[in-house]
Image (cartoon, helix red, strand yellow):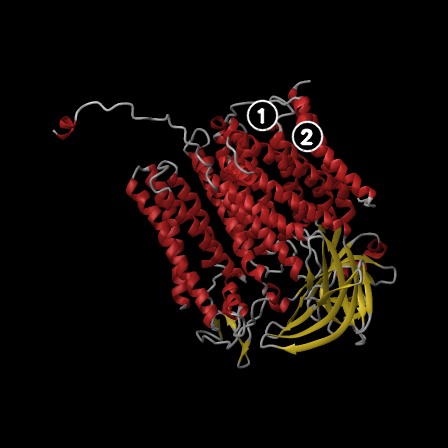
Amino acid sequence: MKNYVKFGILIVAILGTLAWLAVGGISETKTYYKTIAELNQMGEKAQEQRLRVGGDIAPNSIVRDGSQVTFTMAQDNRQLKVVYSGIDPLPDTFRDGAQALADGKLGTDGVFRATKIQAKCASKYEAAPPAVNGNPAVRG
Amino acid sequence: MENLGTLAILLALCFAVYSVLGSLIGKWMNKPLLVLSASRAVYCVWVLLTTAAGLLVYSLIVGDFRLAYVVNHSNKTMATPYKFASWWGGQEGSLLLWSWLLATYTSVVVFQNRRKYRDMMPYVTAVLMTTLAFFVLLISVPEQPFKVLMAGKGNIVDAGDGQGLNPLLQYWTMVIHPPFLYLGYVGFAVPFAFAIASLITKQPGEAWIKTTRRWTLVTWMFQTTGVLLGAGWAYAVLGWGGYWAWDPVENASVLPWITATAFLHSVMMQEKKGMMKVWNVVLVSSTFFLCIFGTMLTRTGVVQSVHAFAQSQLGTYFTTFLSLGIAGTLYLILNRLPYLKSEATIESVLSRESSFLFNNLILLASCFSVLWGTLFPVITEAINGEKISVDAPFFNRVNIPIGLFLMLLTGVGPLIAWRKSSFESLQRAFLWPAASGVLVAALMMAYGVRHVYALISIALCTFVLVTIVIEFFKGANAIRGRTPMNLFSAMWELTHRNTRRYGGYLVHMGVVFMFIGFTGKAFDIDRTLQVKPGETLQLGRYSLNIGQLESGQTNDYQWEVLNIAATKNGQSIGTLRPEQRFYIAARQPSSMVAIRRKLNEDLYLNYAGASNDGKGYVLQAYVFPLVSWIWIGYWVVLFGTIICLIPDKVRLSYPRMQVVTVTGTNEKVQS
């Protein structure tokens, strides 16, 4: 057999295996970004796909019960109740008013079952300049 | 102060542009003095950027709270090292750090080569200074570090105190992680600049590779350090015990590392055999552009990430720079293809060349899969308007087999002969390593391990480790056969005679240790519990007795510590004290986990605060087997890389001279 044929077969085999793994990995873990409004419109389809929903954590809505955490997420005047029971602890930035991203599926009862939560604290990273003498300071 | 800083940055931009134009025009019009002044301008840029950086750091340390940057990233109570680290705690400052590091590197390159490579150097300077001008442009226009707080028009205000550095970043590895990563990112501009210069000047052969070999190794070492520091930080600070989550920003840091690793291997093909010339140029260019791309990912918020930096308008700047740069490089490579002809062809599948080829193929596949996964939301949005992301399982699914295959090549590659190898010689070389790998895996199976990847991984790790150890023993014994000495001095002598080869083996050994650490992931135990004082809970072989909660306050934060007395197999192993802090200035909580690190496993406790009913505490308890080997592996990799950088010991082989007779007379000499 010619050398380049051998190499060709090996390379195709390796890349083929990896591509097969990748395609499987994508279909297994793909997560759709949805807003809460879109979620409400999706109907039953929302219960089949893995979804990622973002929103602000409603103040005083976080309830911890053992390893389970319940909270309400708000986005554009729409609210979504979320239950998290994943194994990873919630990030330190997860608290009232923070922006959260929840990955999971919508349950038949309309409660979102999250398996992963990411949170970022908007006030910290996109810091508004502090007010001075009542006048909001601007960057100049 | 702020005026001086801004002025320094603007002047640096002017000098950088001058340096680019001066180098190119001077070279084309054949005006050596213009070229010289362009390379002197590099030093000016360095001085100016050092001034700007110095001013920013000074403002952070004395607390000049008129500056927006200082208010957002520093405060009065922070310890001085953290104030210093605030330099790279935010967008503007870290871009300034990028620029300053590149200016430093460029100055070193210009100084080192001030009498060498006269034909290439103007282009090297031009490429480096173009990159620098781009970054200085970013801090001159959209992201100025020296903006002051204003109330109304013209009234500068003093905020009095700042918000402090993000508490998550107030940890020693985080203080040095960004500079190391940047040292690696920025450093790859140098080999890239040399590659481009050698293409432009149609250099024959490997001149650019030889001159940049050390650069490449050193920057690779910095990249490795940066990535590992990030992993170590995630493990010790983020509180979920993971060191790698395939987050977009982590991926951004590892992408150029992968191509750089591929490059380090494939340059050997060019040096030894004159092959893969086009490929090497492509690799070094990809590495450079991936470094820029990584900076773009972290700095523009293209992809959602836990490293939530402010969304910014930098995207357009970066996309423009990247597309122009990539298009230019591509044109240059295609145009110079005739100068990049391979001097040899691969003769057999069982050869060193072939193992390098597959090493590169598989590394690039890994790089591509990571890039694809990271950009998946962007790609799907462009195609059908729907943002779809993929998660850690996707990356693991593709990259675990890749990692295992690489491990196999790590064992096989260095021992297989150049050009062509026979099955018989392979059998001789690999009988014992393969046998020991199988034996260890069998023992583990007998012990009850059923995790397939873990078994394969441990078998391969053993295989590679044994090949490396055998290499050292064989070489050392050969030396001892000629000159009697003890085994260790013989091994040292061996390494010293061929530092690249044996240093490389040490790096491989470090990677094996890391893989052993990664394999431990298959056996993690994790538990989240609501506990009360006085309770005892069981976690694997550990039993944890929950004690009292202590609390207090410092200037910076309020803290709560949960005392947990741990015993292992009935024997006390002391008290672990996981802590929960609340930073006052930043209004942000931060957990300080308690980790008992041991070679076989880590016990990892995170106190997540009081439970909601107020009757108990939430505790996350984990056992992570073998994690320490990742960090040990890093130190071995570092040691091996340093060995690679030491020049070979030159064996003196002058013809021996002896005074046989003296002719002539004293008188003659005197007259």
Q: Earlier in the sequence, mark 2 or mark 1?
A: 1
Residue type for callout 1: Trp
**Crowding near the residue tagged with mark 2, few <14, some 14–19, many ≥20 C-alpha atoms within 10 Å:** some
Comparing B581 with B504, the one in front is B504
The subunit letter for the residue under badge 2 reads B
Q: From the viewer's perspective, is residue B184 above or below residue B489?
A: below
**Residue on which the image places disc 2:** B430
Q: Quadrant of the N terminus of chain B?
A: bottom left
Q: Which residue is mark 1?
A: B418
- Nearer to the camera, B491 or B32: B491
Please name whichever residue, B524 or B280, is drawn nearer the observer in this view of the structure. Answer: B524
Residue pictured at 44% horizontal, 43% vertical: B127
**CA distance separating discs 2 and 1:** 16 Å
Q: Residue at x 77, y 40 (%)?
A: B441
Query: Of B473 and B462, which appears nearest the observer?
Result: B473
Callout 2, which amino acid? Phe
* Up-down relation of residue B79 to residue B110 (above or below): below
| Kind of element beneath mark 2 | helix
Q: Let me know if residue A61 appears in the view.
A: no
Task: Please state the horizontal and vertical placement of residue B51, each as a whole percent of the image.
Answer: 39, 61
Look at the numbered discs 2 and 1 and tell me whether their residues touch, using CB distance below 8 Å: no
Q: Position of residue B421 (x, y in %)?
A: 63, 23
Instruction: Tell me whether marks 2 and 1 sit on the same chain.
Output: yes
Give the percent coordinates (x, y) of residue B262.
58, 38
Task: Residue B416: give x, y in percent of width and height.
Answer: 62, 28
Q: Quadrant of residue A63?
A: bottom right
- Judge from the rendering whether residue B126 lies leftward or rightward of residue B474; answer left or right: left
**Chain ID of residue with mark 1:** B
Taking B306 as reference, is A5 above or below it? above
Q: Which mark is residue B446?
A: none
